[in-house]
Amino acid sequence: MNPLHLSGWGVKITVQDLRSRSELVVADGREDDKLATTLRFKPRRFPHSSIVIDGHSGYISLRAFHWLSRNKVPVFVMDFDGTVISSILPPMPVKADLRVAQIQAANDPKKKFSIARAFVQAKIARNLQVLDWLNERYDLRREIQVTKREASKLSRASTVADLRVVEGRVARRYWEAFGKALPEHLDFRGRMTSSHQNNASDPVNLTLNYGYGFLEGECRKAINTVGLEPSVGFLHDFSDYQTKQSLVYDLEEPFRWLVDLTVIQVFESKTLELNDFYFTGDDYRYRFEAEAKRRFIEVLCERFNCVVPHKGHLVKWDTVIQEKASELGRYLTGRSSILDFPEPAPSLQNDNQQLRARILSLSSKKASEYGIGKSTLHYLRKNARSNGSLRIYRKVGQRIALIRKCNDTDGVELQEE
């Protein structure tokens, strides 16, 4: 996952065709004190996985649409709160047999139930794993017990409607526990009240929604690549009154934890704080400050790019999403009997106390010898003293690991966030 994120005023995507070459010309928008930048890319050398635009004004030329399509670059247009307004995807493979099988399965109550159950089972498994991870630092024993009690009712579900009831009850308990891990001043009261969805009514909900927007883009891309019909889902119903990507929402469920975990970590580590958000207009919803948004996207990409063992290989989570879409396609056409969304399971580990102690004992002179500057060392010490999650950027982590190796005093394993 390596999106090119464009924001602010005056986003422009055009193509410059010269006698010697053709280049995609991308002008980022102006936002706050950030200067507009212009980037150029040659065909078949685009280094990003997608383009995500949440700018307020700008345009894409018809020639740019052609260039992006030929180079298989998806484009997602998002609102400020993470809502995906529109997507421009590369040509979808024509697989009539797959689409027929998908529609038949959606109309077969037994098969629809088995597929929907796989999505819910995976989501609940990850929810419980996140709560266990949080319980190592916060006392969530009661909340976990109640959540597990609700999750146990999954075995008694016999219809898709039953699955939705179980999923909803587990989600309610999950968000109650999730809120206990967040500072009180963030005013997080869950994802939904009795009257409405909370949308972006507090900084945490805004950040969750924005992260889910990126996840939705990854799922849309995976479904498009496989050739599945995005509007025909199994857990989420069809809709005849608005554009609804039911299968996209289905595929998101087993992977929402990636966003949830990132949101906990950015607020624990104070990568995001209350002053990184503001109100505007009369809709009473929060917005990101420009720089805060960029920080969050950076951490979110790090989470998606973590690796996990899967089928004998180490793969990143965006690759897992693609593989699960392919697995669903094979299952629908009868080429495979496997539909295992709970696997692979992530390994969630809290920070090693020995690593914190090593950072706190690291002298400025020794840190400087290995390329760790004073400001970086100050940041590391501050986070090592805190009760929050210890997040270390990859390059800094490698340098700390090198210091450990040279000293050869213990076997502490560096956890890379």
Image (tube, rainbow, N blue to C red):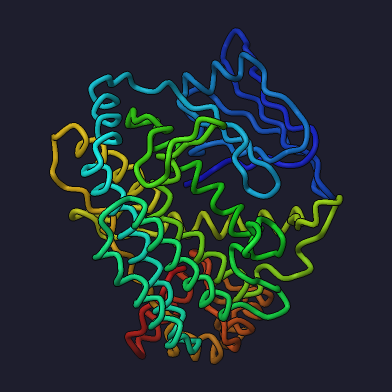
Q: Locate residue 101, reporting x and y percent.
A: 23, 29
Q: Relative to 73, say whether 300 is above or below.
A: below
Question: In the rendered view, does 234 fall on the left or right side of 58?
Answer: left
Q: Nearer the viewer, residue 164 or 126?
A: 164
Q: Residue at x 47, y 19 (%)?
A: 70
Picture coordinates of residue 36 (x, y %)? 78, 39
Work out whether 83 lies above or below 292.
above
Quick check: can you spot residue 286? yes
Identify the residue at horizontal 66%, vertical 80% (top origin): 183
345 shown above or below 380 = above
Q: In screen coordinates, is 70 left or right of 118?
A: right
Give the total of numbered labels.
0
The image quadrant that residue 167 belongs to is: bottom left
Query: Which quarter of the picture shows residue 286?
Result: bottom right
- The picture quadrant where one finds residue 323 is top left
Query: Would you say 370 lies left or right of 341 here?
Result: right
Q: Which residue ends up furthest to the top in the rendered image?
A: 19
* 29 or 216, nearer to the observer: 216
Nearer-the-camera pick, 236 or 408: 236
Q: Is residue 295 visible?
A: no
Q: Residue drawn 61% across and 84% down?
A: 381
Left or right position of 194 against 50: right
Q: Position of residue 182 (x, y in %)?
A: 61, 77
What residue is drawn where x is 82% and y is 58%? 279
Q: Position of residue 76 (x, y in %)?
A: 58, 35
Q: Relative to residue 388, is residue 258 depicted above or below? A: above
